[in-house]
Amino acid sequence: MNWVEILGYVASFLVAISLMMSSIVRLRWINLAGGIAFSAYGFIIGAYPVAAVNAFIACINIFFLIKIYRSQVVFNVIESGSESGQSGYIGYFLDFFSADIDAIYPDFKRRLNMPNREYFLLTEKEHVVGIISGIQHTKSHFEIDLDIVTPAYRDYKLGNYLFGEDNNFASKFAFTKVTANVQTEAYQAYLLKVGFIPENQHIWEYRIPNT
């Protein structure tokens, strides 16, 4: 197998992988890389229609990526109170993403009826795109055991709005200590990216900037 064949296989792999992405941004970036690789492959082997079509696909991806990055994103987090989670919109959202919750937050349903549970709606403009829930131990300490968003928003932008350097979650609700109940490696990977560090095996703490 020569390098030209390898390029063709890599291009095919990238295009296939892009279609598996739940995040639109990741899909566009990986599909762009696949389109560029396929276009180069087509030119090298003299398959000019293949090269032209994939160059066009790459241009489409570039257009939409520019549009995505230039679009104004308006996130917000809204306190929803102590709704049980079994009725209304929160109940619907939790049921709809029940499989994801079981996979990433396996302790949530067991802890669902713990005292002082609170819910927060995560919005982008007028759309609800996620829910944070957890236990308010004190007025200033909140422990998160659920942070679930729709697939299109699983690219850390919302996480960085809530935590990261922006620190909107803690500052908006006057929490001086925010912890997370962590049961899976997938949740650990997210927390590391938005500013949490482990206190012990299952409790991670958000390091609020400038504190």
Image (cartoon, rainbow, N blue to C red):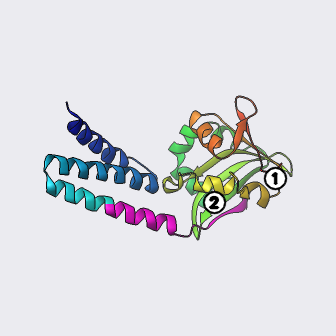
Amino acid type for the residue under numbered disc 2: Leu
Q: Residue at x 24, y 52 (%)?
A: 39
Image coordinates of residue 140 in percent, x first then y, are 85, 51
Marker disc for residue 122: 2
Would residue 82 be visible to someone looking at this image? no
Residue range highlighted in magenta: 59-80
Where disc 1 sits, the SS reads: loop
In this view, 15 is above or below 188: below
Q: Residues within 10 Å of mark 2 (few under 14, many from 20)?
A: many
Does 176 sit left or right of 179 as displayed?
A: right
Q: Residues within 10 Å of mark 1 (few under 14, many from 20)?
A: some
In this view, 103 is above or below 59: above
Image coordinates of residue 32 in percent, x first then y, are 35, 54
In the depicted view, which residue is nearer to us: 126 or 162? 162
Q: Residue at x 51, y 69 (%)?
A: 71
Q: Which residue is mark 1?
A: 175
